[in-house]
């Protein structure tokens, strides 16, 4: 599995920043300008396999990446997400955290955010 994992063989020139636990890259299939991934060096599939120290270290990278995106692109908001397991839509079985900048007007009505994974349950207002 590890040999065929695209995140275990990221070229160094794609890495924006890193620490002892993980690294940051821009998503190769970005859904918005600045869409970024925070990935642990260790090949693990689930967020729930991380130790407390590893979580904190990845969250430090998340916060730092958010600061860089804010300075560069000035988005109006962010979606932060993890697809944990195939039933949740995880297609690469190596944990990665999505940091997706959002901009006013990028969707007609962004209310509900990640709830839209189930469109018939997303809109709970009105």
Image: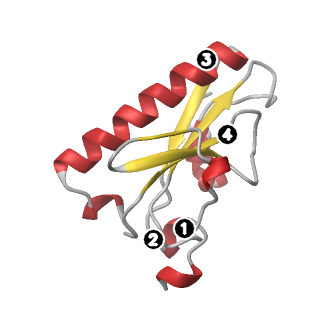
Q: Residues within 10 Å of mark 2 (few under 14, many from 20)?
A: some
Q: Is residue 66 left or right of residue 14?
A: left
User: Mark 4 or mark 2, which has the lower sequence index?
Assistant: 4
CA distance for labels 1 and 2? 5 Å
Residue occupying the point 53% across, 83% down? 3
Q: Judging from the image, what secondary structure is the residue with disc 4 in?
A: loop
Q: Residues within 10 Å of mark 4 (few under 14, many from 20)?
A: many
Residue that mark 1 sits on: 90
Q: Judging from the image, what secondary structure is the residue with disc 1 in?
A: loop
User: Mark 1 or mark 4, which has the lower sequence index?
Assistant: 4
- Tell me, yes or no, whether the two marked residues, 1 and 2, touch with CB atoms within 8 Å: yes
- The location of residue 99, given as percent across then percent down, is 56, 38
Judged by depth in the image, the label closer to the viewer, 1 or 3, is 3
- The location of residue 8, given as percent across then percent down, is 52, 68
Residue that mark 2 sits on: 85
Residue that mark 3 sits on: 70
CA distance for labels 3 and 4? 12 Å
- Tell me, yes or no, whether the two marked residues, 1 and 4, touch with CB atoms within 8 Å: no
Instruction: Looking at the picture, tell me which residue is in the foreground, 112 or 60.
Output: 60
- Tell me, yes or no, whether the two marked residues, 3 and 2, touch with CB atoms within 8 Å: no
User: Mark 3 or mark 2, which has the lower sequence index?
Assistant: 3
- Tell me, yes or no, whether the two marked residues, 1 and 3, touch with CB atoms within 8 Å: no
Is 73 rendered above or below residue 118?
above
Q: Judging from the image, what secondary structure is the residue with disc 3 in?
A: helix
Q: Residues within 10 Å of mark 1 (few under 14, many from 20)?
A: some
CA distance for labels 3 and 2? 30 Å
Q: Does residue 75 appear in this view?
A: no
- Tell me, yes or no, whether the two marked residues, 4 and 2, touch with CB atoms within 8 Å: no
Residue that mark 4 sits on: 35
């Amino acid at each position: 599995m590890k040999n065929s994992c695209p995140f275990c063989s990221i070229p160094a020139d794609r890495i924006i920043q890193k620490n002892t636990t993980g690294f940051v890259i821009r998503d190769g299939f970005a859904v918005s300008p600045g869409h970024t991934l925070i990935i642990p060096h260790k090949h693990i599939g689930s967020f729930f396999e991380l130790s407390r120290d590893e979580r904190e270290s990845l969250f430090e990278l998340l916060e730092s990446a958010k600061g860089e995106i804010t300075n560069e692109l000035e988005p109006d908001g962010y979606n932060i997400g993890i697809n944990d397991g195939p039933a949740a839509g995880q297609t690469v079985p190596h944990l990665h955290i999505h940091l997706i900048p959002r901009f006013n007007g990028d969707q007609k009505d962004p209310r509900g955010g990640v709830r839209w994974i189930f469109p018939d349950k997303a809109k709970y207002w009105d």
